[in-house]
Amino acid sequence: MVQAFIVPGRQERFLYLLTNPRRRKKFLDELGHFRWFDGRFAAPAQWKPDCALSVWGRHQQGIQNIANLLRSRGAAKSCWVISQFAGIDGRELELESALEAVVGKGMGSILSCVPGRLAYFEGEDESLVLAR
């Protein structure tokens, strides 16, 4: 994920941080406002829920729309999670469960759907589809 989607000048630092559990926290602390994705491979994730639905209905439909978008690009049933949420960080989860845990929560998370090829980022300010 780092070598595929992060700008070349920052890859070495982030690999250094992520490979050690003690240093990983420093990477996770930056994840909410992460600005180091390579713009060539990052695009805003479009929820496109039906405005006539309730707030909860729009949330659920948005998650399903993101899951469908990721699956249309080759995502499998499960994904690997890097997240500020300690309960899901470093775990493999079903895609919908991972999306439910991160979408709209305002904390940084990366869902690696196809290693080095497809990921989803949810931060405080934006959500992105990362694809090569």
Image (cartoon, rainbow, N blue to C red):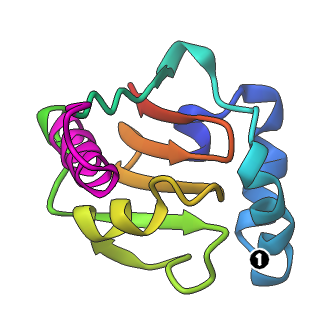
Which residue in the rendered view is the most extreme toward the top?
A: 40
The magenta stretch spans residue 52? yes
Toward which corner of the image does residue 29 lie, by quadrant? bottom right
Quadrant containing the C terminus in the rendered view = top left
Q: Where is residue 92 in the image (x, y as percent from the top left)?
A: 36, 75
Residue drawn at 50 percent across, 79 percent down: 88
- 102 relative to 67 in the view: left or right: right
Q: Where is residue 103 in the image (x, y as percent from the top left)?
A: 45, 54
* Residue beneath the point at 63% across and 46% down: 123
Q: Please tell me which residue is depicted at 79% across the width and 60% down the height of the picture.
A: 27
In the image shown, does 1 or 105 lie closer to the viewer?
Answer: 105
- Residue nearest the observer in this picture, 19 or 60: 60
Tell whether 40 sits left or right of 12: left
Residue 56 picture quarter: bottom left
In the displayed structure, 24 sits above or below 126; it is below
Q: State which quadrant residue 99 falls in.
A: bottom left
Please tell me how crowded label 1 is: few (under 14), some (14-19), or many (20+) other residues with Cα within 10 Å: few
Residue depicted at 54% across the width and 13% down the height: 40
Q: Is mark 1 on a helix, strand or loop?
A: loop
Residue 94 vs 16, above or below: the answer is below
So how many labels did they put on this image?
Answer: 1
Residue position for label 1: 20
Extent of the magenta region: 50-70
132 over 107 or under it: above or below: above
Q: Which residue lies furthest to the bottom in this view?
A: 87
Across and down, in percent, residue 117 comes to 36, 37
Residue 95 lies, in percent from the top left, at 26, 62
Tell me if 39 is positioned left or right of 57 in this view: right
Viewer-proximal residue, 45 or 13?
45
Magenta stretch, main secondary structure, is helix
Amino acid on which the number 1 mark rests in the picture: Asn
